[in-house]
Amino acid sequence: MAKQANPIRIRKLNKDIPKISKDLCDAMLKDLEKGERPVLEAIKCSLDNSIYNPKVGYLTPGEKVVRTELNVSSVQKMARTVFMLEVLLGNLESGAVNTKRELYYMAKGLVKSNQVLRPLDFGDQPESDAVIDFICDMLEVYREEMNCFANDRGGQTYSKQLVVTETLSDGTTANVDLSTLGTTPFQPKNKPQQFKLKAKKKIDFCLVIESEGTANTLVSNGFTQRNNCILVGAQGVPSNGVRGWCKTIQDQLKIPIYFYGDLDAYTLQNIFRTLKAGSAASLIRNSDFSAPDVKFLGVLPEDVKKYDLDCYDVSERDTSEARALKKAKDALENDPFFKDKKNKRLADILRWLVKEKIRCEQQAVFSVNPKDPLMPEKIILEKIKRGAYV
Amino acid sequence: MSKITTSSTAEYFAKNLQQVGFSSPVKAVLTTLKESVDNSLDACEEGKILPELSVSVRKVGTGGSRSTDLVEIVVEDNGPGIETEDLSKVFGEYLASSKFGRGQCSRGQQGIGISAATTWAQLTNASGVKVISKTSRMKKAVRATVDVDIKANKGVLKNKETFDWDRPHGTRVEFRIDGRVQLNGDGGLITYLDGTTLVNPHLHLRYKLLDADWSDVPRVTEEVPQVPPPTLPHPHTMKLGEFMTHAALYGRITLEKFLRKGFSRVTDQTLKELVKNGLPKTHLSKSLTQISEQDYKKIFQAIQNTEMSSPSTRSVLTVGEEGLSKSIQRLGEVDFFSVVTRRPRICDFKPVVVEVAIARFINRASDSQESPVQLLRFANRVPLQFDKAACAITKAVESVNWRSYGLNQPKNSLPLGPYVFAVSVTSPFIKFKNASKETIDASDELVEEIRRSLMQAGQKLSRHIRREDKAADLERKLQHIEKFAPILVEGLARIVKAPESRKQRAQEGLKRLLGRDAEAVEEELQTAESRLAELKAKQGELIGEAEEAAPEEVVASTKKAASGTQKKAGTKKVSAAKKAAATKKMAGTKKATAASGTRKKA
């Protein structure tokens, strides 16, 4: 396969991945020749190694590392790491691009055709995914920079003003004018950072809605016709694609971004926090996969009172809800994002949720005036106008 | 008003046989066999005779009741025999016993069981028990049928005849009852006979069950257990009513004499303390007949408020670690066992001794690791086979954290694995939950004592499990080295395009590194092995195998105990051989890798 003329770039990377990989392997081999134990080190991607600096705006890694020293117990992991690294380096060399699942099957195929490699066989995809993540954390590179792309979901985007220009791998470009798509969304998928964005007319704001269904309802009711805006459906916990897309909109268009979703601990911690400041599991990539300027538009506790929104009781007998509550309590104590005074108001909302043990869904605004289909839009616009966001 | 009538004890039991172990056809066969064997063993022990028992159970037709067979149970012993005039009492009268409440560790206690078996035979097959008996005083043996006169609670002797029997003394009983034969499982006859064999090392048993051939289980000790003499009750073990009934047995003696003669642990000092605690001194010299009910209450209260030394533990009988160790070998080829005989203790003011044997049999080792261990329970050397859940022994087993000894255990349940746990509780005053003696009452003190014994046995067991774990760990690690080391070096060499010489050096370096890890595990294995060997050596001594042609491992471990260096050298040899094999395998793999590498290149 011919090497791509213009490989996909997410960021300006000053690393020569094949070279640092070879250097690493060479050092391991040298250690072995000397009868010494090679050690692999990777950034520890966990909450206890996360730092939140309000000026930076996203979670960054601390100094903790995961050390894997060669011994009888770790020899399997090391052998698998070197094996998968070889596969990935092969892809980089040839320009081939794969998803994690495809890489899992490729590894299985290689093992099947070579008797000696049989012990390396992955039992299930999570085993090979863990090895790929370890390689990326070790080299401090993004998975995408190893030509491994996720099958990202979410990010369906609607706008009458936005034009997206994509530079393809052969060097040609494609222009997508979102106004020409009608109610069909544009989806950035897994490489949003390489898009060039242009506004045909001044865009006032970007609204990210947790539920893709509700985003679609707003568009169908003419939200994007009446407002100069970008509307994005997040489809639950934001994928890398959605996170990178919001970051691209924030950086290139410099417009306010609002998030609208459920009022519950899960949304606040797992969806909004990840969109705004990234996650502990992706410490090395948060800089390009978070949009620190995004604001929490709702549903806010004050909206519940103001619009008399229907709430549900959170039952601690329900295991998933009990787990979410426990996680919320933990977050208030241990999550540097919620502990920082810059996010005090968000932490207050979390505390309120833990205390009140209720949740309010984003669709509750449809109860305010069921006969007026534009009511949700009116409430959202009114809140933006009033500055009723956190 | 309807007329009030009284019924005889026999009438009561005839209507309530389910209370004494005849609640189902399966239980009926087992209970009949059990009662016969218990009586034989008790009689032999009393006569200081080494028991020779012959047991046969067979189907001889269809039972009278639905879905039952007519089952013949024959038990023959070489005991002292029963005098002709006693036959009707022993087999046909309820509560006619020489053992009732006398405070001895005998199997039978109340004199109900064998009469109940006779009643069952009579009710289901219209004929009682056929007995042959000969004592050494009798010139000829007597053969008769004993029935129960249910209305009068009396035994009736029928068809009596004498004949020449080719043995000096003994008893043979033959029951024909409606029942069903179950051989295996908790309520099975084989389980019962195995259990009886285990706790009676001095028993020579021959048995034939259904169509199987005769089995012969020789005895492993020539010593008849010395059943300690009866012990007097401890004053703290009685209730007021019992206390007064007990007094009535002593007639016109003074209270002081009664307290001294009728109880254990009553001394001069105790009497002084009693007076201090509210017993009017004048009462001591009063005759028992002169003491009023009110006074009895005062005396009883004073006794309860007075501290006394615990009862003597001399009245309890143990099987002993040696006996258990030898006996356990009779149940099958043992892969591992540990036995614990605790010192007698006082639980609830009664002397108790707990013994535990844990074993894994080679033929059972393939059983699922996921099924619960087989628990054999014994009370006064009688297997308990029903109503497991409520028993003190089961509760104690479940309360131990077996995970810390290396066994899997679901919460509050029996541990899992192919092991047999045998727990024996012996006491002259054992407290059962029911008349059929299937469950030991679970008092906190007793459960705690059993639990401690189990934990002691568990510690021994853990040595065995730890050694197995270490061996598996070493095996896994050696396999790991073999499998992954060449792949790792090959992969690294391919990425950096290293020449063959570097690859060779790295291979050797890696082998050295991982070899060191394997050595560390090997050392751990050696430690575990030597600890187990010490244990096995001790056990070998118990079963007298050290001097005989014992299994290789036990001999090796005994030798090791004698000379540590010798064993060490042996183990080293083994480990060196193991390593050589691993290296050889590695070299083989390396060649294969190289070959495949070349193929790939080509």
Image (tube, coloured by chain):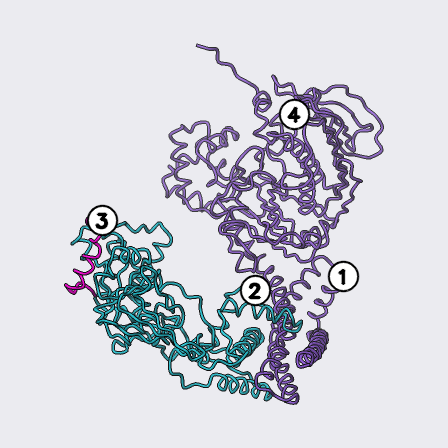
Disc 3 marks which amino acid? Ser
Residue B401 is left or right of residue B593, and the answer is left
Label the purple chain with its letter. B
Alpha carbons under labels 1 and 4: distance apart: 48 Å
Q: Which disc is residue A123 wearing?
A: 2
Alpha carbons under labels 2 and 4: distance apart: 63 Å
Which chain's residue wears label 1?
A: B
Q: Colour of chain A?
A: cyan
Disc 2 marks which amino acid? Gly
Residue B376 x/y as whole percent: 62, 46
Residue A282 is left or right of residue B181, and the answer is left
Asked where in the image residue B381 lies, by quadrant, the reply is top right
Quick check: do tags 4 and 3 share a chain?
no
Residue B223 is left or right of residue B480, and the answer is right
Residue linked to disc 3:
A367
Are the residues at dot 1 and dot 4 in contact (C-beta closer than 8 Å)? Answer: no
Residue linked to disc 1:
B550
Which chain's residue wears label 4?
A: B
Are the residues at dot 2 and dot 3 in contact (C-beta closer than 8 Å)? Answer: no
Disc 1 marks which amino acid? Ala
Alpha carbons under labels 1 and 3: distance apart: 86 Å
Residue A82 is left or right of residue B124, and the answer is left
Neighbour class for label 4 at 10 Å: few (<14), some, many (≥20)?
A: many
Which portion, as a residue range, is magenta? A366-390
The tag earlier along the polypeptide, 2 or 3, is 2
Residue linked to disc 4:
B120
Instruction: Decide which of B416, A124 is in the foreground and name it.
Output: A124
